[in-house]
Image (cartoon, rainbow, N blue to C red):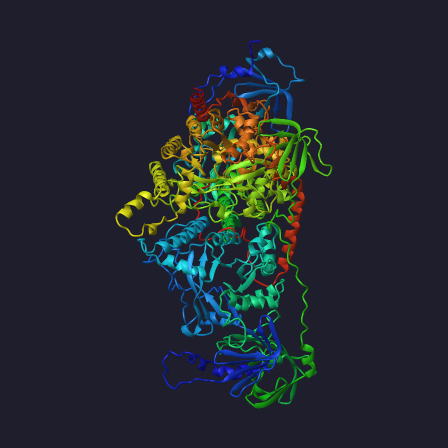
Amino acid sequence: MMKSIFSLFAACVFSFTLLAQETFPVNGVHDKKPIYYAFTNAHIYKSATEYIAKGTLLIKEGKVVAAGAEVQIPAGTVVKNCEGLYIYPSFIDAYAGFNQSKKGAKKEMVPHSHWNPSIHPEHQYLADFPLDEKTKNDWLASGFGVANLHHRDGIMRGYGQLIMLGIDQPNTALISAKSTAHFSFAKGTSNIDYPTSHIGAVALLRQSFYDANWYEGNTSKTKENTLAFAEMKKQVSANCIFELSNPLTLRNVIGLEQEFGRTFIVKGTGEEYLLDKSQLEGRNMIVPISFPKAYDIKDPYEARMISLAQLKQWETAPFNPYFLDQNGVTISLSRDTIGSAKEFLANLKQVTESGFDHDKALAALTTTPAQMLKVSESIGDLKAGKLANFFISNKRFDEDGFAIAQHWNKGQMVLNKPLPDQSLIGDYNLVVNGQNYDLKITEVSEKAIKASAKYKGSETKVKTTIEKDNDLITIVLMSGDSNSTLLFQLSGKLSLKGTVWDGKGQDNTGEWVTWAAVKDRKSELTTGKTTEIKAEVKPPILMKPNMAYGVIDQNMKNTFVITNAKVWTCGPDGLLENADIYVVDGKIKSIGKDQMYPTELVRINANGKHVTPGIIDEHSHIGIFGGANEWGQSSSAEVRISDAIDPWNINIYRQLAGGVTAAQLLHGSANPIGGQSALIELKWGQSADEMLIDNAPGFIKFALGENVKRSNSNRKGDRFPETRMGVEQTFADAFIRAHEYGAPKSLAEDTKRKSGDENPRQASKRKDLELDVLLEILNDTRYITCHSYVQSEILMLMNLADSLGFRVNTFTHILEGYKVANEMAAHGANGSTFADWWAYKFEVNDAIPYNAALMQKAGVNVGINSDDAEMGRRLNQEAAKTMKYGGVSEIDALNMITINPAKMLHLEDRMGSIEVGKEANLVVWSDHPLSVYAHPEKTMINGVEYYDASKAEAQLDMINRERSRIIALMLKDKSSAKQKPKAKEERHYECDTLLENYWEE
Amino acid sequence: MKKIIILQALFCFLSFNLFAQAPTPGKASDKKILIRYATAHIGNGEKIDNAYVAVQGKELLFVMDANTARINLAEFDSIIDASGKHIYPGFIVMDSRLGLTEIDAVKATRDFDEIGTYNPNVRALPAFNTESKIIATMRPNGVLMSQIAPKGGLISGASSAVHFDGWNWTEATVKADEGIYLNWPSRYRYTGWWVEPGAGEINKKYDDQITEIAQYFAEAKAYSGFENKPSQNLRFEAMNGLFQGSKRLYVRVSWAKDMLDVIQFLRASGVKNYAIVGGEEAHLITTELKENKVPVIINRVHALPEHEDDAVDAPYSLASKLSTAGVQIAFAMNGDMEAMISRNLPFQVGTAVHYGLEYEKAIEAITLTPAKLMGIDQQYGSLQSGKRATFFLCDGDAFDMRTNQIIVAFIEGKIIDLNNSQTALYEKYLQRIED
């Protein structure tokens, strides 16, 4: 029986602790204990795949000797009968989230460190021993005997440390000192601005890895002696763990793996079920199981603050391991930052009920993390020779009422938590001083024993308080009336295991009496609980994206004909009445009238409708996570918006509904040289990679004026430039550096050779991601889109470009473009502007709505852009304003949002007009596309219909039904504390990301 | 028929200085002008397809159906043939900071947000700058009047009705201090911006804040009951009109549940007239709004839906939903860049029309309804004889960007100059390009 094991072992536990300290001097007589411990008759999970129904675990001096059904028990063994109990190998948390003291944290720049304080791969995490007693015991009680800890701060965080949690001496507790190397995209407590954004973090990682490669080949010559780079190289073969900021950042990790030939174990966020199999398959992942709490949404108005995405997240989160497993991920489960053992075990049980069963979960908590951390030879199962790390529980961890009684680390009992003695429950005949009572014990928990009593044969109640201390029991009886008169104070012992209690007591006059209680055997039989059989929970259906307007099965059909439409070709054919557009495999095959088509061809009758090319928004910031501005430096050419595409942003769908099919996602305008643009097609429901336009030309954002000189920012005086004078110098300096960077090394090397330098090859060129990009501009392989307002700065940049040998492809905003339109035309610059914005800051005081018309008149290729998620969904109206302001023709106005921006983006051979051979990016309009009374009925990209206005009602209905279904589940949920409605989750951003709110980027 | 003016020649007839900064106010004239054969959108939900609209002095002499009316053409000094054109009463934008700001990012030009929580005594009117270059750009789009309103604090201050022609604010005033603006606290708040929406926030102080507001109104009402005041309280003085019915309370509020709180609170507050401004979720409580006769001043049709799950066109169709349910509506342009963007009022309302708002009701919502809310409908807001001649003649449909070409506009019977600093720059640089 289970009771004995606890009482006997408790005494010997702590004498063990000094044993293993072989190198430590002993104060007194040595106390080596070469004895065995045998745990017999237990359900043993020898490993995740080996279950022994009734077996013995034999251990000696910290290691497993044997585990099996037929284990010989040698002489010198303490035998413990574990009948009815379970023995599991200790859980291993590869990413435990505690012991985060700042001790050893890198606080300031030290020699040998990287210039950026968020990069400190050389840092060694040292656990803070002894571990906090309460935390340690809580982790042991949740099954974890081994934890991998690291300092969760910075982008390259340094080494983690694998320790046994129950042991207080660092050298004994340690399994591996440099068990893992850690990476993230969160800059943490670093005291300098850069990187301010996710895109900056990716760029910093890339540059650092390149630097490490360069450093290796140049150690003898370089003036730098940076320990960080040496450690980076060493870590190629280490267990590298990359913590994601959000599921989308897995894409960046894959990018780093491919670029640098590294492999990372990925620590997920718990929402990786949102990702595609192609990204997940074959990957090692550490998966946290903290789930969002149910929302308190009793009030239907308040419920509106919770999006379907949040509701679905709540419903789907427990299925994350299931979905990842289905997609071929090797999973280690982690307690991560879950605050209590209780919550972890409840969540673990939920996981096992959500398609990831007991055996899978066990592997994910034992053998898999051991393999991932490459410590399988010592931990992860209970095979002979392994460290004796295990726990003893009353049940399987997927059963109700599971509790851990003992936890052993390295053969030492490190947690002893007697389980409440459930055998007490039952009906008793209690006799006190000759008086008979019916005593009922109904519930035994850690905190209290619930009991009630009555006089035998009567309904008169007696108040009963019972406390148990090991095998001794105390009972207080008081009258059941309002007076609560004391009747008896009783103390006794267990006489016959579990059935008879007897002893002595005093009545309310102080007289000593005798008492006994005998358990009714019948009641024992009837109290046995039947295990509840739960209906299997089906995994929720995942939409793409998993939110409102998500798609379940995108119809990818892209061959059809649109008939009888009024076609605005935006090409040489101009406006065609009653024309057909025949699309085959996503491309325009023919345009004309009365042609013969295959009989089974899908026909879209557009009689009375207008068809235009998809709108192209030259200036957009939708669907970017983690900051659109890397403003930490005045040049951030190295950052790429393509690293931060959020394909799950609702504004992508909303713009589709406005007829937009392609957009340039631009870096913000916080610095003169911003980052590289991403050119995307708004393929709602597809991944970021699928949205990015294949082989799109490279673009970069430049910016001039008030934003870059931070005129309207609260931060002042800490970053060059602060004037338009300084802006010019920033560009001049950057391009001169780029020229030198790109120039052949010969001159410098010749000099060295002559001076007798024995190994000039050593001074090989350091790859500079920023200068690489500027060099692309000089080599005409990357185009500039420059945020600009006033004529002086526009002229400055064109003059500088002419003198330094590059061209400004596009001036965007360009609200004073009309003042220098002739010069722009001569330079060959495009102008992408707003229809009528002005007066929001000083530099737009001379902005006029006639700007587009005037620039066009001067021969500039003009576009109308949005720079705003709201305006982006009705760019047709904005284009129409050029008719009011300046008398632009209908066709020219429409061109300003189709073919003209396509030309600016050098995509005009693929999109922007309805011409044979071009991509079928089409919009079917309900009316004249420039009318205020028109809306897109269908929006197609490469012939695939991504938006259909006629489905709006059904979609809304589906959204509402899904919402109601999940809200009903949530209102039923009593498992956890509820959280008050939060309008939006933080999924799409990092808290470390600073963002300057330039509201008109 | 020397008196009949063809439209092309109209601008020769009007002698305006093209390169004016803010144009010179119109000149009063006692001449009789007739505009005939245009479609007249009256402003009260009706229209006359073939109308006579006559102006003399400050007033509209008459507005009649040309098919039936008999008039004596000889009486008129000028006759404008406007067949195929449209006449609208001057559009009115509510809750506006026009004239109270010039450059949003320059603090020195921002005169709409006063320090303090309860500022009922703070008045928008004396800060109203008739020399504003922004105001001059409203007129060529048909926006001829506005309600200018302070924006800050809980009680922002007093709003006034103004028109867009006058040498100074006293001349531009239509009705001084006609309302008080209250910013109702919100239970929830979205953080971040559209590029990166932030986590939502619950306003834990909401209950305290509305208790405080209720207390303030109770005190103001008690004060209004004095026959002989022991001492003067400027703030409470300004509140008096709310309880006497001479001022309207305008409550900026967005969420359905918060609006229900507003309705409950105002029912017992003693405030006689009020309106909701914003009301992004008003479509959820149309029954309550109608029962309590609460007008809603819709804020910006061209907006993103409030919630991710909302219909894509939710802000576009709000006006139609309210109007169909019988809720009285008007429009405001509150928010980022609102001053300059107010000239897009007609196009925003045009979008609402496309999403179901009946055309003449849409006209009413930016003419007669706002005039009624501000208590100036006796003289403004519609094309009716005896009212002030504040209207414009448009080449086509004023709600459509393509056809919103204004031929002539009148404010208080004066023909106004439609040029402004932007047209001046246009002319100037057009020459440079053409040369």
Q: Is residue B420 left or right of residue B73?
A: left
**Residue for point 59% across, 54% down:** A277
Q: Residue furthest top?
A: B1
Q: Is residue A784 left or right of residue B287?
A: left
Percent position of residue B226, x then y: 48, 42
Q: Is residue B312 left or right of residue B124?
A: right
Q: Tell me if residue A18 comes above or below residue A557 in the rendering.
A: below
In-front residue for pair A499/B225: A499
Percent position of residue A982, x then y: 54, 53
Percent position of residue A403, x then y: 57, 73
Q: Tell me if residue A7 comes above or below residue A562 in the rendering.
A: below
Q: Tell me if residue B324 comes above or below residue A24 in the rendering.
A: above
State the image quarter where residue A610 is shown: top right
In-front residue for pair B266/A172: A172
State the image quarter where residue B99 is shown: top left
State the image quarter where residue A418 is shown: bottom right
In-front residue for pair B375/B181: B181
* Quarter of the N terminus of chain A within the rendering: bottom right
Is residue B126 among the parts visible in the rendering?
Answer: yes
Is residue B375 among the parts visible in the rendering?
Answer: no
Percent position of residue B286, x then y: 63, 42
